[in-house]
Image: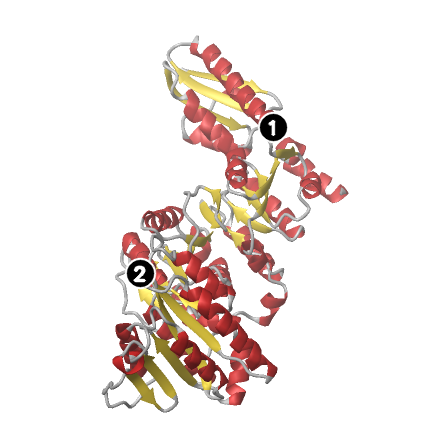
Amino acid sequence: MLYTVIKKNLFQDSVSLMLLTNHLSAIDGVNQIQVMMGTPANKDIFKGSGLYTDELEDASPSDLCIVVNSDDEGIVDKVVEETDEYLSNQSSESQQSSISVVRTWEMAGNKLPNADVAMISVAGEHAAAEANKALDRDLNVFMFSDNVSVSDELQLKQRAQEKGLIVMGPDCGTGILDGVPMAFANVVDKGNIGIVGASGTGIQEVSTIIGRNDGGVSHAIGTGGRDLSSEIGAITTIRGLQVLDQDAETDIIVYISKPPAPEVREKVVNVFKTLSKPVVAVFIGDKPKAAHDNVHYTWTLEDTALKALELSKGNKASADRIIADNQDDLNKMKETKQQYVKGYFCGGTLAYETAMILEDALDLDTTGKHTEGMMLHVEGHEVIDLGDDQYTQGRAHPMIDPTLRIEKVEEAAKDPETAVILLDNVIGYGAHEDMAGVFAPVVQEAKEEAAKVGKTFVAIASVTGTADDPQVYQDQVDKLEAAGIIVTESNAQATKLAAEIVKYVKGEKTIATNVDQQSNENDKVAELIASKPRVINVGLKSFSEAVLEHGGEVVQYQWAPIAGGNKRLAKILEKLK
């Protein structure tokens, strides 16, 4: 038998009521139960689930409605008691929390005037109106709410685009912004892999595999599953891809798609081709296509995570990012015709590897003969193993004695054709106690001397060693970087980066400039991911707690529908403002 309880003027958000319904369903003797606000849409749900009663007819949108199916009328008292206790506990927890709670947009703005995103989880019929209020205040929108119409979604996304903002969702279940979880998300270390995804659980699966395998995520931008429809045209997807391409913390971009409209898929793939960073893309349900340009297609979510990890570990110093960061200096080298690499090594095999990579990358015509430590000497390029017998007669090995390498570096810095100086730094037992401490001031002074005559060069180094070595790997890296030396994860990475820089100064390589000028001038999305998000949370309070726990700022907007959900009265009140 059905029993109905109406609690007048007791508004609660829909997600909280779903959790309450789930809680009450566990009571012995309850066959079925539903707790919702008395909106027309919810009354239809009561009818659809066989729980509609005549008492619901007079319930208003601001009334809390409980309908329980039980064989025992006495169970109703237990349900009411549990409901009151549940809501009371929620209120008590709210009062004890350090999160500011407000009841209007104006109060939220006063509490957090530099807010940059609104997270919205109110009932779908109200979500678009609240999202528009957020856009009015120049806030990006993360919309967890579902049941938003296509026309409302398109209006919101087009309006956000015009204002340099982004709307993630509706029905956006997952996001990570600068390490801060948005809605449903896992705790994943920060790293250099950025994700754009139309699938919430897809983002969670990929990001957690990345995290469990010692990788990390820069940001995860959810789009909502309908973003790839013909009607929406991937507005948020494209903006998400572009902003991650601009992001200095992101080296690899993962794209996770539900089945898209064919023409939208083509549109997204064309955007991939314009990005300067490698893309790993999975279109769930489609067999992966052959890789092209900088795009790698995968078949499963696991494949996607592992491919992104593989690429990320080889791209911690991506050439495009380094070139973009040093573009003024490199353009100066273009004018002065500085086009050659000078590499001075204490490790013979490392020197050999560098010569091998440069020959291939720069298509150099060499004889392949390596005598007297000269691993490469063609055109103006030079790679020398200073540990060769030729250079150690009467002096200690360069892994111990840096004197000869210092002389070579100083000569190369003065050479008008030098573009890049490459160095290795092999640490460990038996090696120099602080080789980075020796070369850091040498390179720094050489750069200062070059600047006096209007020139510059790029210095790149790798460190072969571990954290447990006496010199300590990271200490050596820090000293080199403090002197303006670019430090890569491996000798191979250092050499490939040198080759890319040479191609750039010779005019054989360009970096992508794929974001339109308008968005650059008014790019609130780039600002959003540049630091921890500052959130106005409209709806489910537990989302606020996660933001605060991970370093974001948040204000909890304890939302309730205007005029108790009476739409006609609400419109009148809106016009009176």
Residue 198, position as x, y percentages in the image: 41, 53
Residue neighbourhood size for the residue with mark 2, other residues' Cα within 10 Å, grouped as few (<14), some (14–19), many (≥20):
few
Residue at the extreme front: 394
* Residue 357 drawn at (x, y percent): 30, 78
Q: Are marks 2 and 1 in contact (CB under 8 Å)?
A: no
Question: What type is the residue that disc 1 sits on?
Answer: Ser
Per the image, label 2 sits on a secondary structure element best described as: helix
Which residue is located at x 67 percent, y 40 percent? 108
The residue pinned by badge 2 equals 310
Query: Is there any visible trace of residue 500 in the rendered image?
Result: yes
Amino acid identity at mark 2: Glu
Q: Quadrant of residue 110?
A: top right
Q: Give the camera-side residue of 138 and 467.
A: 467
Up-down relation of residue 344 to residue 286 (above or below)? below
Residue position marked by numbered label 1 in the rendering: 62
Residue 528 to residue 93: above or below: below
Of residue 474 and residue 120, the one placed in the foreground of this image is 474
Q: Quadrant of residue 428?
A: bottom left
Binning the other alpha carbons within 10 Å of mark 1 as few (below 14), some (14 to 19) or many (20 upward) gives many
